[in-house]
Image (spheres, helix red, strand yellow):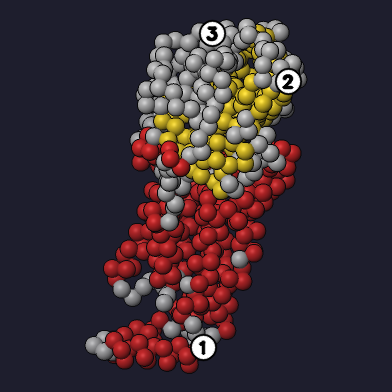
């Protein structure tokens, strides 16, 4: 088994890892039937639309919603709340932008009346059908119209029959919004109520569907992450989970909105296709604990909203402070999570130390090569030993070309005599593959790499190399199509891969030799569309591999002059 066969095995195994796992092993979402769901006596407010766990057949108004707004801002968020329904439907990130030009801020939530509504409401429901609860058309009152950083937003609503709702909204220095509702009962009777939240998105699908990245509805229920596609929800109509200490939300590549109650409250979470509101997907939860509130009594309850960038250190901080179960799984680190997250923190540390994310990638690549040196050393020694035996192997193949059994017998006898294990060159390569894909995941999903500059023409490590061979790297005023955008870094990667192959002897089979000669060109075109940070990693890794293999080959030749 020579070096080329090892490489071929690695490529085949890589394709299996990339494609086969999701196809064969990724668990399918199982929908619970309505008969399996616990029945809830809570009744939907007539003024609201499709509240969780409630079977309302009322039609949903498709007209424009009323608006009366208050504005707010915090250290990293800004937006407005529509006092009709106390609706969060305008929310922007103050320190993230759509392009490196920083002209347009990232918008997380979108106006109910826009082409792609994406909004949040929190409300109350009761077991008493005659009791009016706040709904989407309820006009809440605010103390003022503008709320600055650090100011608590106070809203209130009265049903006119003795039940008052007071809402306090606090936004921390990052992306966590806490909502504390107090209900005051002066209705003259005991009422049974519970709270809910729902997040709705309409006319949206991810622009790019990456099979290695989940974008869409997800949540953690009963200590397990559940990822659901938009298509699955539309096909199954409704997916329900009952849990405690979990969360539910929508995730995009770099952004997320997640909703959850206080972590000691059991709740029912749901993914719902709104059939009477086309192209609308709703995720929601309703508190399973129905509270009995006596006359002249009051109660308080908290709900939380995470709306912002998926910054791993920040999310880990929230997990510690608020005890949010596995919120970090919203960052799609994949099924090599046990490798991916430590690699992320290593890269995060090195990038902060060097002041440049690209330099951090290079340092991390060197560190990985050092850690894997014993494995790589063993692999290269085995490859080079096999290389020395190549002429003898070729003679055996020619001598016993009509007797495969005898040929294999003689070859294994020679391996035993020379104390060489042909498989020893394969295993180290297979062990390194999970590390490679874990690092690939880190570079692909980490928001820290988004819009992170390197040097020269690389202004964004999360985007492909913007230069192209086919316009002479910008000298010709022509923008080639995407498949012809082959930049400087992909070309460097292809050259290093070619040099790495030239160090090794060509395989005896001429057809196999031609295939392997084509690989550097194929990978150059393939990686031209990858994030440039990934291409930097691959290029540096190739250079280190060439240096290591050249050194070992030279040393082995000196130790064995006959070769």
x and y, in percent, of residue 301 in the image: 69, 27
Q: Is residue 57 left or right of residue 149?
A: left
Closer to the camera: disc 2 or disc 3? 2
Decide if residue 101 is on the left or right side of residue 177: left
Q: How many marks?
A: 3
Q: Earlier in the sequence, mark 1 or mark 3?
A: 3
Q: How far apart are labels 2 and 1 at the CA level?
A: 82 Å
Q: Are marks 2 and 1 in contact (CB under 8 Å)?
A: no
Mark on residue 298?
A: 2
Residue at x-position 31% and y-position 85%: 397
Q: Which residue is under mark 3?
A: 67
Where's residue 22, x and y in %? Answer: 42, 52
Seen in the picture, residue 102 relative to 457 is either above or below; the reply is: above
Which residue in the structure is indicated by mark 1? 419
Classify mark 2: helix, strand or loop: strand
Image quadrant in which you'd find residue 108: top right
Which residue occupies the foreground of this view, 398 or 201? 201
């Amino acid at each position: 088994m020579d070096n080329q066969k090892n490489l071929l095995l690695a490529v085949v195994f890589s394709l299996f890892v990339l494609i086969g796992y999701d196809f064969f092993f990724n668990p399918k979402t199982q929908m619970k039937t309505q008969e399996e769901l616990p029945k809830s006596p809570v009744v939907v407010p007539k003024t609201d639309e499709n509240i969780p766990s409630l079977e309302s057949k009322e039609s949903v108004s498709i007209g424009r919603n009323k608006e009366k707004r208050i504005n707010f801002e915090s250290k990293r968020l800004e937006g407005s709340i529509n006092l009709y329904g106390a609706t969060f439907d305008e929310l922007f990130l103050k320190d993230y932008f759509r392009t490196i030009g920083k002209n347009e801020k990232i918008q997380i939530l979108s106006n109910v009346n826009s082409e792609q509504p994406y909004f949040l409401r929190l409300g109350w429901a009761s077991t008493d059908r005659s009791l009016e609860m706040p709904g989407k058309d309820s006009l809440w009152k605010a103390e003022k119209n503008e709320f600055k950083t650090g100011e608590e937003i106070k809203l209130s609503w009265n049903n006119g029959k003795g039940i008052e709702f007071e809402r306090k909204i606090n936004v921390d220095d990052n992306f966590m919004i806490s909502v504390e509702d107090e209900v005051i009962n002066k209705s003259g009777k005991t009422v049974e109520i519970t709270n809910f939240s729902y997040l709705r998105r309409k006319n949206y699908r991810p622009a790019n569907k990456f099979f290695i990245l989940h974008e869409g509805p997800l949540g953690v229920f009963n200590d397990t992450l559940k990822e659901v596609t938009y298509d699955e929800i539309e096909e199954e109509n409704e997916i329900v989970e009952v849990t405690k200490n979990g969360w539910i939300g929508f995730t995009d590549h770099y952004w997320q909105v997640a909703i959850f109650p206080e972590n000691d409250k059991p709740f029912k979470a749901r993914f719902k296709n709104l059939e009477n509101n086309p192209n609308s997907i709703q995720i929601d939860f309703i508190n399973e604990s129905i509270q009995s509130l006596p006359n002249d009594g009051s109660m308080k309850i908290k709900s939380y909203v995470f709306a912002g960038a998926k910054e791993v250190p920040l999310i880990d901080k929230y997990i510690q402070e608020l005890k949010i179960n596995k919120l970090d799984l919203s960052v799609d680190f994949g099924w090599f999570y046990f490798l991916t997250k430590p690699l992320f923190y290593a890269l995060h540390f090195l990038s902060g130390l060097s002041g440049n994310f690209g330099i951090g990638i290079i340092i991390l690549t060197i560190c990985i090569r050092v850690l894997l040196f014993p494995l790589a050393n063993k692999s290269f020694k085995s490859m080079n030993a096999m290389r020395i035996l190549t002429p003898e192997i070729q003679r055996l193949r020619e001598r016993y070309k009509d007797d495969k059994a005898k040929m294999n017998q003689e070859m294994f006898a020679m391996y035993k005599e020379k104390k060489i294990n042909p498989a020893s060159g394969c295993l180290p390569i297979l062990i390194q593959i999970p590390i490679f894909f874990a690092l690939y995941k880190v570079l692909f999903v980490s928001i820290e790499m988004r819009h992170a500059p390197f040097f020269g023409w690389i202004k964004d490590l999360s985007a492909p190399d913007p230069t192209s061979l086919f316009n002479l790297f910008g000298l010709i005023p022509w923008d080639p199509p995407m498949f012809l955008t082959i930049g400087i870094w992909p070309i460097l990667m292809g050259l290093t891969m070619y040099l790495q192959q030239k160090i090794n002897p060509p395989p005896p089979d001429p057809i196999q030799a031609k295939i392997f000669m084509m690989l550097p060109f194929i990978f150059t075109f393939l990686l031209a569309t990858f994030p440039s940070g990934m291409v930097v990693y691959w290029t540096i890794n190739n250079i280190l591999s060439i240096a290591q293999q050249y050194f070992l080959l030279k040393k082995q030749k000196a130790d064995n002059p006959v070769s």
